[in-house]
Image (cartoon, rainbow, N blue to C red):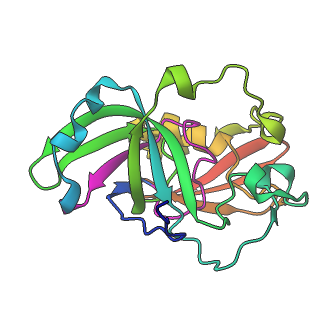
Amino acid sequence: MQKHSEDLTLKKIAVIRTDFPEKFGLPRQSGLAETRGKVVFEPEYRSKDALRGLEDYSHLWLLWGFSEVKQKTWHATVRPPRLGGNTRMGVFATRSPFRPNPIGLSCVRLVKICDTEKEGNVLLVEGVDMMDGTPIYDVKPYLPYVDCKMDAAGGFAEQHKNDGLQVEFEKDLELCVPEEHRTVLRQILAQDPRPSYQEDPERIYGMDYAGMQIRFRVADGCLRVCSVQ
């Protein structure tokens, strides 16, 4: 019997370019906002043959790395933000980035495949929940007949899937946001980017998105944008 190595070295095959320079403000899961990204393959993997047939799929699985996680150890339980940061759940019952192996999995919509002169074939995708520059380890097609389980149970996460905030802009601030980003920004903010345990209505939070710095406060279920720079 062939002996398999316990260690596996993953090769970065691509990076994804997004409008998120930092973790704060990222959608909590893929597909919750119409956030777009561009998968740029490493030179070694810029092969048209490797993408042959991919255009026939509407959605993809991206396997990627939590590149900003510096924690070297893991714990059996974590505090999911959606449970207020006070309740502990088993790490394997969550999608926490603090895992034995810092690997993420996202389902995104394939918008189109572009053949560029500088970067070769790139994938334009929608529904991303990753920072700019996140390493991609693999791309797989989403197969509805096996990947979609209509009778699946969503655990504790199902109880909070409809949590959201009303989003308002002070004065004419929404006009400071480029039109192509307005709907997506509202989708992101409605998910409440704050850690769930922070409830100070006077605190002003800031997040960077698409070259803008957005400042906001939250009170009584309403997120009010107070500055766009």
Question: Count of labels shown?
Answer: 0
Q: Residue at x 47, y 56 (%)?
A: 64
Q: Nearer the viewer, residue 219 or 95?
A: 95
Tell me what residue is drawn at x 49 percent, y 60 percent.
Answer: 1
Does the segment drawn in magenta span residue 163?
A: no
In the image, 10 versus 35, the foreground residue is 10
Above or below, 100 against 199 in this view is: below
* Residue 156 placement (x, y as % from top left): 84, 40
Please, which residue is most extreme toward the right here?
A: 87
Is 123 above or below relative to 81? above
Looking at the image, residue 119 sits to the left or right of residue 97; the answer is: left
Left or right: residue 15 compared with residue 68: left
Q: Position of residue 223 (x, y in %)?
A: 72, 45
Residue at position x 36%, y 33% in the image: 110
- Extreme residue in the left direction: 117
Residue found at the far front of this picture: 1
The answer to whether residue 229 of the structure is visible from this angle is: no
Horizontal arrangement in the rendering, residue 14 relative to residue 176 (left or right): left
Main SS, magenta region, reads: loop
Which residues fall within the magenta stretch?
20-43
Residue 196: tell me if it is visible: yes
Q: Residue at x 72, y 56 (%)?
A: 194
Vertical comparison of 213 with 59: above or below: below
Provide residue 129's location: percent of width, then percent of height: 53, 49
* Residue 42 within the segment the image draws in magenta: yes
The answer to which image quadrant residue 146 occupies is top right
Question: Is 68 on the left or on the right of 169, as rendered?
Answer: left
Q: Quadrant of residue 132?
A: bottom left
